[in-house]
Image (cartoon, rainbow, N blue to C red):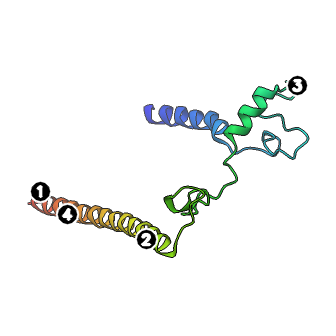
Amino acid sequence: MKASLFSLLAAAALFTSTASFAAEGPFDHRYDDRNSKDFNYGYDRNHRVTAAEKARWEAAHRNDRRDNDDHFDRNQNYGYDRNHRVTAQERARWEAQQRAQREAQERAQREAQIRAQREAQERARYEAAHRQYGRR
């Protein structure tokens, strides 16, 4: 009796909570596209956006279109001042440093994966050994 009651309660809870986790429908999206006629800088449709609100939104979203996967930012100029003319030797040194950093990061990730695999194997061996002794 208790099991069926709990299963009914769990089913009811799951059924009522699915709407909160559902994906957006076709009419649920907010108009965040600046080219849309309904775009209003994140405010309600009838809100009149002030210049300060518009400037704040522009500042917050200024870097959205930049490719963050690029390892080189053109404004960086290989770590030198913007008006410094970078030589081939300086560029090569910078690229070697970046490559070394990426390799070190990849090596650390591989070592962490190997360590996790070894720990899982040792744990499995330990559990298997204790299961074996527990059956005697």
Measured in 3D between alpha carbons, the distance from the residue under mark 4 to the one under mark 2, in whole angstroms, is 43 Å
Q: Position of residue 101 (x, y in %)?
A: 39, 65
Label 4 element class? helix
Mark 2 vs mark 1: in front: 2
Q: Badge 1 local density, few (<14 within 10 Å), some, or many (20+)?
A: few
Residue depicted at 43% across the width and 71% down the height: 93
Q: Amino acid at mark 4?
A: Glu
Quadrant that contains the N terminus: top left
Q: Which residue is mark 1?
A: 134
The residue at the far right in this view is 37
Front residue of 46 and 85: 85
Measured in 3D between alpha carbons, the distance from the residue under mark 1 to the one under mark 3, in whole angstroms, is 71 Å
Q: Which residue is mark 2?
A: 93
Q: Amino acid at mark 1?
A: Gly
Q: Amino acid at mark 3?
A: Asn
Question: Could you say which disc has been placed on residue 45 in the image?
Answer: none
Q: Which residue is mark 4?
A: 122
Query: Do callouts 2 and 3 mark residues in contact (Cβ within 8 Å)?
Result: no
